[in-house]
Amino acid sequence: MALALENVSKHFGSLVAIRNLSLSFDVGSIYSIIGPNGAGKSTVVNMIAGSYAVTSGTIRLGETALNRLPKHRIAQLGVSRTYQNLRLFDGMTVLENLEVCFFPQSWLTFLTGAKRLSKAERLEICHACLAEFHLSDVADVLAGDLPYGRQKILELARAFVTQAPIVLLDEPAAGLNHTETKDMAAMIAGLKREDRAIILVEHDMDMVMSISDRIDVLNYGELLCSGTPDLVRTNERVQEAYLGTTEELDDIRKLAQSRRAQGGLRANAGIVRH
Amino acid sequence: MFDYFLQQLIFALAIGAIYGLIALGYTMVYGVMRLINFAHGEFFMLGPYIYTFLFSGLVGLGGLAPVLDSAIAIVASFVIVGLLGVAIERFAYRPLRAYGRLAPMLSALGMSIVLQSAVRVTVGPQPVHFPAIVPSTPIDALGGMVTTVQLGILIAAVLLMVGLTLFVNGTRLGIWIRAASESWTTSSLLGIRVNRAVSLVFFIGPGLGAMAGIMYASYYGIMQPTMGSVIGLKAFTAAILGGIGSIPGAMLGGFLLGAIEVFGTAFLPILSFGYIGTEYRDVFAFAVLILVLLFKPAGLLGETVSEETTVAKKDY
Amino acid sequence: MGNSVIARRLGLLAVLALCVVLLALVPYFPSYYVRVVDSILIYIILAVGLNLVVGYAGLLDLGFIAFYAVGAYAYAMLASGQFDIHLPFIVVLFIGAAAGAIAGILLGFPVLKLRGDYLAIVTLSFGEIIRIAINNADDLTNGPQGIAGLDRASLFGLPLTTPVHFYWLLLVLAIIVCAGVYYMERSILGKAWRALREDQDVVRGLGINTTTLKLLAFALSAAIGGAGGVIFGAFQRFVSPESFTFQESLLVVLIIIIGGVGNIVGVIAGAVVLVVLPEILHFAAQYRLLIYGVVLVTVIVLRPGGLVSPRFNLGFIIRKVRTLWLSPSKT
Ligand SMILES: Nc1ncnc2c1ncn2[C@@H]1O[C@H](COP(=O)(O)OP(=O)(O)OP(=O)(O)O)[C@@H](O)[C@H]1O
Ligand SMILES: [Mg+2]
C-alpha cells in the first residue's frame, strides 16, 4: 500500500504553510520529514491524518483519496499517528489506552459482534504489545501517572497496536534525554516491517540519520531536498537552511519578517505553539 | 403599519439592550474562567432591590434632589452588586479552580439558590412595585409611539456598552482582561495579575447585570425574586448566540435576541395564519439559537478553534 | 484460615445483611418515608441514566428532564381518559423508553458535533422548548392544567397503586439500571466513552466515529429518562408541565456532581443527599431553600471532587467482596 501527496497545499489565512508538496511513501521503509521549526512538518502529518483539510491537492492511500474522508474513516483505512504534544487518555490505565483502539468500527460489527475481537483476544494482543514496548509492569497504572519518557513510549505503542500500515510519528523523541532518545531510535528501527510505512517527524539528527531510509527536508512549506541520509547530510541547501550562510541568514530573517507581517499574530503563534 | 413597526423596533432595541448587558456578564466571566456563571441572573434581580432600598433610604434621610438620589442609588447599586460578585468569586469559585469545570458550575448553581432565597426571605416572594426613575411619558416627536422609559433604557444601555468597549480596548486593566481571556497561562507568565483581571470581571459583570435589572424593572414597573431566572437563561442564550467569550458578540447576541423575540411574537401569528401564537414567544429564542449553532458551531462572532489547537482537551 | 479473616467475613456479612434488612423494612415505614425513598430511587435511576452522558461521555446535558417529560406524557396520553386509550403499564414503559430514545437521537443527531458549552446550552434549549410546547399544545397535553386521572397501573396482574408497590418496582428497576450501566462501564463501550471524555479528537484519530458513540450515550440515557418518566406518571397519576422545569434538569446534574462524576456509588449517595436534605430542612420553613443553597455551596467547596471518591466505586466494592471471599490472604 502506498501513500501519496499530490501537489498538496495548505493555507492558514494568508499564511502558506505547505506549498505544492508532492511526496510518496511506500510500505517497508522508514521515512523522515525534517526541517526547521515552522517548516510545516506537523501540518503534513495533520493533513494526512485528516485533522486539517488540505487547501488544494490530493492525498491518496492506494487508490482512495483521503482528503475527502472524515478523520475516523482515514484511521480505519490504516493510518495511525502520535501527536507532537502527548495526547494520552490520562485518566485511563496503560492497558485501557491500548484497548480502546479495538473499539468496533461500525454499528454492524458493534451490534452483531461479527469480525469483532473477543475480550480475551483483545487483551492478549494488548498484553503482547505492552510486552513489546516494555510496559507490562505498568499495565494497570494510570497513563497520566507515568513518567514522561514512558508516556511517550505508550503513545508509540498506541500507534502500533492495531498494526496500521501507515504510522505517522510526530516528534517521538521530543523532550527525551540522550539515552531515552537512543532507546526510542532503536525501538522505532525495530518496528520497521514489510507491510508498514513509518513516517517520522523529528528534530534529533542522530536518530533521523541512523534509522531513515529516506529523508525529506521541508523549509517554509516546500520540499528542499529528498534522499538517503548521506545525500541529505552533504546537501548544501539543507545545511544553509539549518545553519545558514551569512547572506542567507539575512535573507531568512527578512523572509521571516515579511511572513510574520503577512500572517499577523497567527504566524507568530507558531513560535509559542509546539 | 410603519408606526407599528417603529414601535416594535424600539421595543426590540430596548429589551435587546437589556439582554446584551446581562450577556456581557456571562461572556466576560466565561472568557476568563470558562465558567457558566449560573448565579448571574440573580445579580440582575438584586439590582432593582438594592436600588429601591438605597433610594428609599436616601429619601427617608431627607434626601437631595430626587434626580441626585436616583443617580447615587444607581451608582451605589452597581458598586454593591459588583463587590458582591467579587466576594462570591473569591469564596465560592476560586477554591475550585483546580477541579475541572463542573464543580465551579455547581457552586454557581448553589449561589444562585442562596441569593434568590435570601431575597425571598427578606422581602417576601410576591412581586412588588418598582418606582419609576423617569416618568413614563410618550414622546410626541415619534408619533407618541415611544416612551421616555424605552428611550432612556436604550440610551443608558448603549452608553454602558460603549464605555465597556472603550475600557477593555483602551485601558491597561481592560487589556489584562482580554489577555486573561486569550490565555490564562501565557498571561500569568507575562506577569499579568490574572486574579485581578478575574476580580475585575466579577465586578463589572454583576454590576452591569444590576443595571440591566434596574432598567427591566423600570420598564415593567415591577420586581420579584424570581425575575432573574428566565431572563438570565435568555441572556445566556444571547451570549452563546454571539459567540461566548466575545464582548461584541454578547451585545450583538442581545440585540438579535430582542429582535427575534419581539418581531417573532409580532409577526409569526400573522405569517402562520394564527397557527403559531404568541405563547411560543419563549421558544423563538431557543429555536433560533439551535439553528444558528448548527451552521456556526461557535456562535456568530465566536472564534472557531481548530481541533488540533484546542487548549482544553476535555469538554467537561 | 485465621480468626481475623472469619471476623472480616462476618463483618461483611453483617453489612450486607443490614442493607438487605433495611431495604426489606422500607415498606413498613410510615407512608411519608416510603415516598421519600421512592423519590430517591427515581432520582437514582434518572441520575445513573444521565451519568452515561455527563459522567462517562463527558457531554454536559442540561435538558435531560425533557426525556423524563416525554415518558411521563407518554403514560398520560396512552393510559388515561385523555384520548380514552388505556394501554397496560408495561407496554407504555417500553413505549416511553423508546420514545425517549428517539427524542434523544432526534436531538442528538444535529447537535452532537457541538462542543462543551454549546452542547450544554442547546440541550438546555431543547428542554425548554419541550416544556413550552407541552404547556401550549392544549389539544394534546391539556396545557398548564396538565392531565389528571391517569390509569391505576398494574404489572403482571399485581396492582401498582401504593407507594410501597412502587417502592418494589423502583427498587428492582434501579438495580437493573445500575447493573446494566455498570456492565457497560466495564465493557469496551465504557472505555471508549471515557476516552471520549478525555480527548475526543484522539478518539476520532483511533478510527472511532465519535458521533455514533455520543449518540449511543444520548439515546441510552434518554431511554432511561423516558422509562423513569412513565413510572413517575403512573405514580403521581397526574402530570403537568410544572414538573419538568430547567431546575429539575439541574437537580439531576447536581446529584451526579455532588456524588462524584462517573461513579454509580457516588450517584446513589448524591441522590440520597439531595432528596433527603430538603425533607430534613422542612423545619426551617421559609429558610429552607436558603440553607439548602448554603449547604450545597459549602459541600462543593469542601469536597470539589464529589462526596464519594472516584476510587470507591462499584467495581472496588465488588473486588473487595470477591477477594475477601475467594482469596482472603490477599486482603
Ligand atoms: N492551526 C493553525 N492555524 C494557523 N497557523 C498554523 C496552524 N497550524 C500550523 N500553523 C502554521 O503553519 C506553519 C507550519 O507549522 P507546523 O506546526 O507544521 O510546523 P512544524 O514544522 O511542525 O514545526 P515544529 O518543528 O515547531 O513542530 C507555522 O508557521 C505555523 O504557525
Ligand atoms: Mg511540529
Image: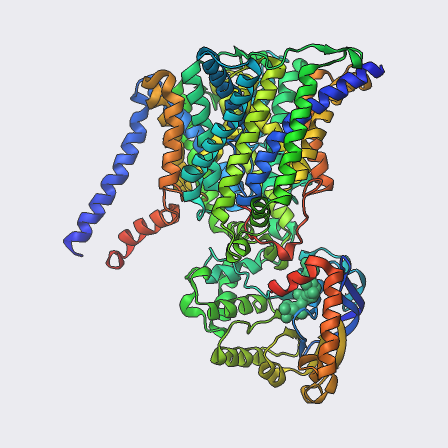
Would you identify the image quadrant in which residue B170 lies?
Answer: top right
The residue that appears at 73% across and 75% down in the rendered structure is A252
Q: Quadrant of ligand 1?
A: bottom right
Q: How many marks?
A: 0
Can residue B162 be seen here? yes
Residue C327 lies, with reference to residue B36, above or below; the image says below
User: In this rendering, would C162 be left or right of A261?
Assistant: left
In percent of width and height, residue A86 lies at 54, 63
- The residue sitting at the front extreme is B64
Q: Is residue C101 left or right of residue A180?
A: right
Q: Is residue A31 left or right of residue C196?
A: right
Q: Assign the C terminus of chain A to one quadrant of the image.
A: bottom right
Q: How is the image coloured?
A: rainbow
Residue C91 is situated, as x and y percent measured from the top left of the image, at 56, 26
| In front of the other: B92 or C48 | B92
x and y, in percent, of residue B174 in the image: 59, 44
- The N terminus of chain A is located in which quarter? bottom right
Residue situated in front as seen by the camera: B304 or A256? A256
Residue in the foreground of this view, choosing between B194 and C212: B194
